[in-house]
Image (cartoon, coloured by chain):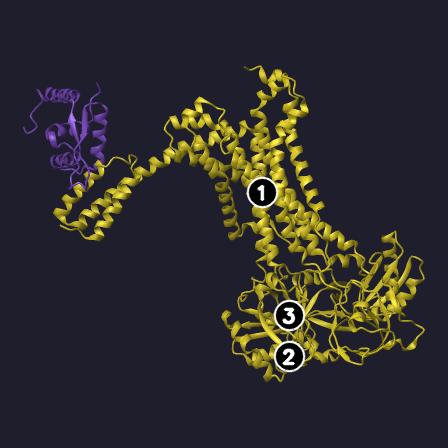
Chain colours: A purple, B yellow
Amino acid sequence: MKLLSRSEELVLLAVWKLQEEAYCVPIRSELMQITRKNWSFGSIYDPLERLERKKLLESYLTEPTKERGGRSKRIYRMTKHGKKALMELKRIQETLWQGAMDLKA
Amino acid sequence: MTPNPKYQKLLKFAEWVLKSIHSDHGEYTHLGDFSEVFSHIQAERGPAAALFWYWLQVVRSLPGFATNRIYWSFIMFRNYLIISYRTTLKNKWFSLLNIAGRAVGMACFILILMFVQFETSFDRFHEKSDRICRVISRHTKRQPDVTEFDDNTPELLAEALAADFPEIKRATRTREAFADRAILQYQDKIFYQKGIFADPEFLKIFSFPSLKGDLEQALVVPKSIVLTQHVAQKLFGSDDPLGRIISYKERNRQYDMTVTGVIADVPKNSHLQFDYIVSHATTVAEKKDSYMIGNWNVWNYATYVELTDSQAKSQVEEKFPAFLARQGQEAGSDEFFLQPIRDIHLKSQIRGERATNNQIQYVYLFMSIALIILLIACINYMNLVTARSMTRAKEIGIRKVAGANRRQLSKQFLGETLLVTAFALGFSLLTIKFILPYFNILIGTDLQLSALTQPNLLVLIAGTVLFVGIASGTYPALILSALKPVNVFKEFSAFGKKGAGLRNVLVVFQFGVSIVLIASTLIVYNQLNFIKNQKLGFDREHVVLIPVWEKETSDKAQAIRTELLQHPEVTGVSISGGLPTNIRSRYFGGKFMKDNGEYVETFVCFDYVDYDFLDVFKIELVKGRNFSREFGEDKKAILINETLWKKLGWADPVGKEVDVMDYNRVIGVVKDFHFASFHKEIEPMVLAFGEGGNIAVRIQPGGVTSRVELIRTVFENNSKSQPFDFYFLDDSFNEFYRKEQRTGEIFGYFSLLAIFIACLGLLGLASFTVERRTKEIGIRKILGAPVTKLVGLLTKDFVRMVVLANLIAWPVAYIAMRKWLENFAYRINITLGTFLLAAAAALLIAFITISTQTLRAALSNPVDTLRCE
């Protein structure tokens, strides 16, 4: 299977981390906080849509809330495949880091 | 927290923009995300910042949206184009009918638009055209039986008006030269030209652009003349005309004129038409003309005023009675009104209008007929497309299955119609280019193709294309897009039946209009023929007329007569003021004594004739005798016509004492003859003895050219200073009816066009019907049906529609034409025969059109039509 792009990877990870709160707005603010970069809505929607098409994510709609002007949230949940892909990525990263010199040194 | 309502509105608007540009209209979660962030920011940094952020998002999403949209619409548009192109080529015959019909309809409409634009542009080129008025007058006391206005005013009126009314900024007086055409001569170049006399104010009020010379001063001095460009060009070529002396001859006046200016040629859309202007000071200085200067009783000048403000017209008119009283005129004797010059061409109904006027009704009439023809062309398209919807059914089905919605399909078909219409526009412009010269001759205008580039016409033409496209495309688009894919693939036979009722109604309408036009044309021509074959009371054929323009010719007229009479080809010569087609002077002071001794004053038409007048024009004498060379005292005698005799009720008119001008005795009565057009009843008339400005020569029939040559030689032997010029009495008679003649011709062409386009439509429908019934015909043939019966079967429905159209068209045509005929005092009755003829013509044409299709089908070999199954 092809590797995920960096933005896909980050979004996927954020979805996993946020669990039940994983919809666009918290994902975006989480990523903005951690990366200290501005993420546009488009740059979140796009990976989310792609991941969903690749069946790594699935989504459902919640009840509408007042805060959102009477509109529902689309909450994302990781699928089995998503989990596998994320684990694979983690393995690759960790394997690569193994034996590499400590950057702080 | 209640947000500011203004912010709220802006927010709503932003949301609406986002919603409408997003491809997934139903997906509201994105908007939810946006509004969530919005409220976060609002809580942290206030509503203004939040709103700013929101709008930033909107703006940033636009470029992506735009590229997306353009990309996809291009793809779809290309597809639509290819499909249109293919269907056009696939049904060449059908497409040809379609485009041809529309091109002809549009060409006709655009031509009429150009014509209307020209007609409504009259006199608008003057900068102050909204403020210039012509003074029109009516002599209530002096001519009680004349209710019409005319534009004659006394010479001194202009000055008096300008001095008396603060609302009148300037006033000018102008009159036409006495002779219709005067002679202008420079060295060996000699030309007849039509001109006017005017004072210096004339060129300040009207905007005739100056090319050479100072127009402020050009008309101040006596014997100065301003030429229009083409006259200056003819006389002087490329030399500078300013300051040159030309010789000017008119009747018995002759001047050496100094050219003081050159102006551009007078545009065709001006009611004032002239080739040169002579200064009014010339008339003032001329002794012979002194009687009309400063005289309240001689009315032969036209007065134009420039108002300070376009609203001042009615104020000025209200003050006219008081003004007339100040001028020492008897109250109620004359009435003056102002007429805006923009209204002169289309709305003026005054007597003796100087230029040929049109009537706004005619303009409306042409406009509506052109619209109807355009409508007929649109109907063709509607009928053909819906009838043949079967051919597109599969495509529509596939498109629908692939997800096209009704809106997209409607757009596609509407777009296709527009495309074909634009294509047809190209053809119609090409057509116009070729027929414009003929159209100009027909309507008597001078339209140029370049007129089409005028912005308002361009807009109108674009509007026409849109109108035609939408009018003819909407209905088919709705019908086609409503087809249900399931039905499309299930059974074909249902198609084409859809909307058959409406189609029939439309065909009936088309033919109804065509029949109305044909019947109208026939009636117009019948009336014109009636006029031409009427007993006029004089013989208008074989008479050559030579107008006398200047003094030498006038002096030599008798010599010319004597010499002409020596030739056997010439049977008579009369030198008279009046012509039987042109006795229009009216005299209001005639006094007649009735048999009971009572004096009556009645107006009469009056003109001068000589001894030979009655012989040359073959006018019958019913009582008394003609003027005769043997009776010396005839110089004071008059002839009257039967109408006047009847009006006065004399038992025996011969020898009656009268007082008409200087004449005192009736010597004879002539049979009534039509000396005005058939629009009017014959009026009382007096012919007095005297010579005048026309040499009328009656020639033997046959060999017209050689006879005119003979007359020319004789004329040129005698008169050196007037170029030979002649016309036939016949032509001057026809001039009366030129407008009617023209209307007749235009109706003729319009009805031809209408029936042509209607037939194109019928042809398409017939070929479609035949196509659908080929199998049926094949089977009928095998079973032994004869060709005639088959043709009858296929033709029946169409013929029935044309017959129905007749029934509707007859009353319409009858009412309209009766109204038109009311313009004539002498007119035909509308007979049933005319209508039957129109009906027969329409039926025959329709039948021939349909037969081309039905015959082919009926004659075809059933083997060919049936073998495919």
Q: Chain of mark 1?
A: B
Question: Which residue is found at the position 62% from the left and 45% from the top?
Answer: B809
Is residue B727 in view from this perspective?
no
Instruction: Identify the mark nearer the N-term, 3 or 2.
Output: 3
**Type of amino acid under label 1:** Gly
**Type of amino acid under label 2:** Ser
Q: In front here: B791 or B632?
A: B791
Alpha carbon distance from label 1 to label 2: 54 Å
Residue picked out by circle 3: B149
Within 10 Å of disc 1 (Cα), the crowding (few <14, some 14-19, many 20+) is: many
Q: Chain of mark 3?
A: B
Instruction: Identify the mark nearer the N-term, 3 or 1.
Output: 1
Residue B636 percent location from the top left of the image: 85, 77
Residue B869 percent location from the top left of the image: 54, 14
Within 10 Å of disc 3 (Cα), the crowding (few <14, some 14-19, many 20+) is: many
Residue B670 percent location from the top left of the image: 84, 67
Viewer-side label of 3, 1: 3
Viewer-side label of 1, 2: 2
Q: Is residue B568 left or right of residue A31?
A: right
Q: Is residue A42 left or right of residue B72?
A: left
User: Residue B105, labelled with which disc?
Assistant: 1
Q: In front here: B600 or B607?
A: B600
Alpha carbon distance from label 3 to label 2: 14 Å
Q: Chain of mark 2?
A: B
At numbered mark 1, what does the secondary structure look like: helix, strand or loop? helix
Alpha carbon distance from label 3 to label 1: 41 Å
Residue at mark 3 shares a chain with residue at mark 1:
yes
Marks 1 and 2: CB-CB under 8 Å?
Answer: no
User: Residue B333, labelled with which disc?
Assistant: 2
**Type of amino acid under label 3:** Phe
